[in-house]
Amino acid sequence: MQFTSSIVTQTMAKVLNFLLGISLSILLLNVCANGRAVVNNASTLSEDDATPKGSNFTYVCDPKRLDDLGLEISSFAFCDSSLPYPVRVKDLVDRMTIDEKVLQLGNHGKGVQRLGLPKYEWWSEALHGVSNVGPGTYFDDLVPGATSFPTVILTTASFNESLWKTIGQAVSTEARAMYNLGRAGLTFWSPTINVLRDPRWGRATETPGEDPFIVGKYAANYVRGLQDVEGHDNYTDPNSRPLKVSSCCKHYAAYDVDNWSGVDRFHFDARVTEQDMVETFLRPFEMCVKEGDASSIMCSYNRVNGIPTCADPKLLNQTVRGEWDLHGYIVSDCDSIEVMVDDHKFLGDTREDAVARTLKAGLDLDCGDYYPDFTGSAFRQGKVREADVDKSLKYLYTVLMRLGWFDGHPQYKSLGKADVCADEHIELAADAARQGIVLLKNDNDTLPLSTSKFRNLAVVGPHANATSAMLGNYAGAPCRYRAPIDGFAAYGKVSYAMGCGEAMCKNESLIFPAVRAAKKADATIIVAGLDMTIEAESLDRENLTLPGYQTQLINQVTEAAEGPVILVIMSAGGVDISFAKDNTKIKAILWAGYPGEEGGRAIADIVFGKHNPGGRLPITWYEEEYAQKLPMTSLQLRPIDSLGYPGRTYKFFNGSTVYPFGHGLSYTKFNYTNLKTSKRAIHIKLSKFNHCHNLNYTSGAYQAPCPAMIVDDLKCHDYQFDFEVEVLNVGKRDGSEVIIVYSQPPNELAASPIKQVIGFQRVSVPAGESQKVKFKYNVCESLQIVDSSAQIVLPSGGHTILVGDSGVSFPIHVYFD
């Protein structure tokens, strides 16, 4: 009998306990063909089995495994790899009794012993690295950590699609390696792709920012990085396309209030206009499904216009499954059905009513116990059909087949411990942080600092020695930490003083040592900001200011400092640091998000010029007054004049800001020249079957004879425009420039976006050189708006294309002939 390596390395006492608690037949199934355990908590064949974590099976349909169990593989059509997945899955589901079926509908899938079907834990997380949140993944002496990349909000600030996908590929490699070692599952409930509508939201760190198009692009790229198997990007049948790991886009939909002023996510009813649903809240999820081909969507805790999202057939069956054609399963946020009954008290439903309602609405898997515990009784009460259960199981087991859980994935068989925390992944984490960090201010070109001039450094503030604070939330155990004081120690002699005992900075007792350090230093770096005690899941902010005595710390240290002062802010949501922006003694300000395990190294590399910053803000940084003008619970994006509410996000807010969306400086300067456009007028010929669509115009504006056309009524693929711009680096340093392209609807339209992102590219340009950058767009996709009736339309008239903040723009006039 051959034991797996994970068991051999355990102490003799653990081995003896293991042997006492398990039968010989179960031991035999744990033998791996390559001597290595494979799935965490996923192989045991009875509920009371005591198999330790890390001691598992090769794959379900391994002939030797089934033979050891006394089962004949030839009798199971679901193990016949020559058959199509639908045939195999149907055979598996049809063999189960109703009582066996319902036990597979929770995240702790119980398995069916008589069919050789193991348990499977669906819940693992990989938001910005393999996480230990959820029971499907864990770390121990064999795998003590995994690469912790910057949190999503900072990675998004790189505006680099290839980076987003590359990080997904690295994370999925580590995930697959941990699966091989028995320490992770194959289904990861990431990424979070809710639009950051309000900067106070506690989960801002998880999001890709405030623009729905950018959020959708991040989602599609990260999901592709996680899921795509090389050589299988395009597949005739998407429901059979192999998966490296399974990704899940969450939380669907209109979810961005956690716990604010007595309102929590378990009771909140998001009152949303259909216009905002289509334009903002649904678009990233549609892109995630259609462009990313995500294999799962997670519904959220909240209600939308009175209906819990997990019980809404329009959101689930009609939209995700129907209109978008999801190739995968829909899962609830954890205990959402229980929340629906106990907190929302939706329609006075019993527990059986609730599981029947959600199952029929399109919810396939319950992260929780309601489905396993109450679907059987709902069936016996006649509230749900066995066919409804079967449909969900087929979606679930199809995904597991695509993952190789039944047949194995030979190309990933060799992945193991050496592939977790690999050197290239750690360096990728550092590079991602460097690419994302945003230079907000740099008076008199103070940065980068010279190592010959600035040798004695004071590094002070509550995050000067940050470790876990750099990771944000949904992080696992990192490979290592590089705190800011570690990063700066590579460039000079560091004097460290906390200044505050923690980010909350509840007293001023530690400020004086920081002041004293600044007086003696050639340069002072203050590392301040927020952390998970201030903005986190279940914790929204009440204001946009720095907490406690941090402002006093920064001002006193700055006043005492002899050399230049550089302020580094760690946060997810924006912070009103107008006082620092306006302080002429604070020469430079960096925003570092939560930069991951290598964050301190990345910050120091930028301050000393080893890397030229190029990140841009993916959110608007509002002044504190903004947060006092409207409640988080108002979800409308457009201004509400009758209530005095300003608009939200750069698309609808036209007031003053601390720093605007897209802001970011460099150590060099770029000019845009030689704009070349393919066309500046688009003539769309209409047939007698096309009917013009009316729009709302501003008072007194000229109204076109045919104001707009519904996009679905046009042959949109026939209408394109493109342009080319030359980006010239006129400075003395190599650098990268983020080119953000916006469209601006005709001025005469009422309540339309001020502008909206339609594309972006990050390009590297050596000093003194130039690069030509090409953009190509579909007219219907890039010039569309969502009108007040929630129709996606293409307006006629004069549109404007804006190329970043460069001042370069050109008109495109749309005519309907």
Image: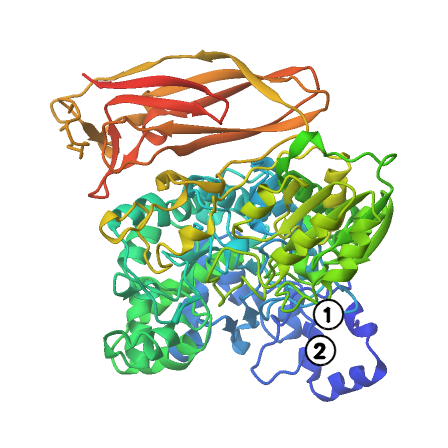
The answer to whether residue 426 of the structure is visible from this angle is no
Residue 662 rendering spot, x and y as whole percentages: 51, 36
- Between residues 406 and 569, which one lies in front from this camera angle? 569
Question: Circle 1 is placed at which residue position?
Answer: 31
**Which image quadrant is residue 210 in?**
top left
Question: Circle 2 is placed at which residue position?
Answer: 27
Residue type pointed to by label 2: Leu
Q: As drawn, which residue projects farthest toward the front?
A: 559
Residue 14 rendering spot, x and y as whole percentages: 79, 83
SS label for mark 1:
loop
SS label for mark 2:
helix
Identity of the residue drawn at 66% across and 83% down? 50
- Residue 53, compared with residue 402, is above or below; it is below
- Between residues 650 and 302, which one lies in front from this camera angle? 650
- Residue 457, compared with residue 632, is above or below; it is above
Q: Quadrant of the C terminus?
A: top left
From the viewer's perspective, is 567 left or right of 371? right
Residue 261 rendering spot, x and y as whole percentages: 40, 68
- Between residues 347 and 756, which one lies in front from this camera angle? 756
Q: Quadrant of the N terminus?
A: bottom right
| Contact flag, marks 2 and 1 (Cβ < 8 Å) | yes
Give me the C-alpha separation between circle 2 and circle 1: 7 Å
Check residue 86 in the rendering and tell me which mark sits there, or answer none: none
Residue type pointed to by label 1: Val
- Characterize the local packing of mark 2: few (<14), some (14-19) or many (20 or more) Cα atoms within 10 angstroms: many
The answer to whether residue 623 of the structure is visible from this angle is yes
From the viewer's perspective, is 138 left or right of 142? left
